[in-house]
Image (cartoon, rainbow, N blue to C red):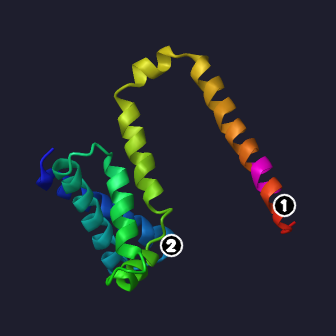
Amino acid sequence: MRYIEWLILLVIGACGTGLANFIGYDVGFLDSLPGLVILVVISMLAVVCTKVIPLKLPIVAYCAIIGLISACPLSPIRSFVIASAAAINFTAPFTMVGAYAGLAIGDQLKQFVKQGPKILIVGLLVMTGTFLGSCIWDSLVLTLTGAI
């Protein structure tokens, strides 16, 4: 994919995130705009890094590294990055992710139906196991720390 295509997709995603932040969390779009721009810039830098740096890391890894570097105490833009990102409620992008996942599975619906009830059973077991495992772990940690 070319850089301009990445930029267009990231801007569309940022607009959707800003809209979800406005509708769901009453944060004005202009209040979210600096944080959205920061996230798009970090993401674009990560895309460039995957093309330039010979180390084959996923884009998400480069996003995390660049984000950590830009928000670390040694960074001169630290306070701006943190303040801008704080205006975005990071559960807002989940709306966009859910929509993208629904669209992605939409064209593979026939193959999904061929799985039959097995896929539902496996999905329920995975979600239940994850939930129960998290509950057990949280209870253990909270008990050990004396919080409960």
97 sits to left or right of 47: right
How many numbered marks appear?
2
| Picture layout, residue 3 above or below residue 69 | above
The structure residue drawn at horizontal position 37% and vertical position 52%, both measured from the top left corner, is: 61
| Picture layout, residue 129 above or below residue 76 | above
* Image x and y of residue 48, in percent: 19, 55
Query: Mark 2 is on which residue type?
Result: Tyr
| Picture layout, residue 84 above or below residue 51 | below
Query: Mark 1 is on which residue type?
Result: Leu
1 or 2: mark nearer the eye: 1
Task: Name the magenta segment's main secondary structure.
Answer: helix
For residue 15, say whether it is visible.
no
Earlier residue among tags 1 and 2: 2
Q: Judging from the image, what secondary structure is the residue with disc 2 in?
A: helix
The stretch drawn in magenta includes residue 15: no
The structure residue drawn at horizontal position 34% and vertical position 73%, both measured from the top left corner, is: 70
Q: Judging from the image, what secondary structure is the residue with disc 1 in?
A: helix
* Image x and y of residue 108, in percent: 37, 25
Residue stretch in magenta: 135-139
112 sits to left or right of 143: left
The stretch drawn in magenta includes residue 136: yes
42 sits to left or right of 28: left
Q: Where is mark 1, residue-wise? A: 144
* Image x and y of residue 71, in percent: 40, 75
* Res. 25 mark: 2
The structure residue drawn at horizontal position 40% and vertical position 53%, both measured from the top left corner, is: 96
Disc 2 crowd, CA 10 A, few/some/many (<14, 14-19, 20+): few
The C terminus - image quarter: bottom right
* Image x and y of residue 56, in percent: 28, 42
Quarter assignment of residue 133: top right
Disc 1 crowd, CA 10 A, few/some/many (<14, 14-19, 20+): few
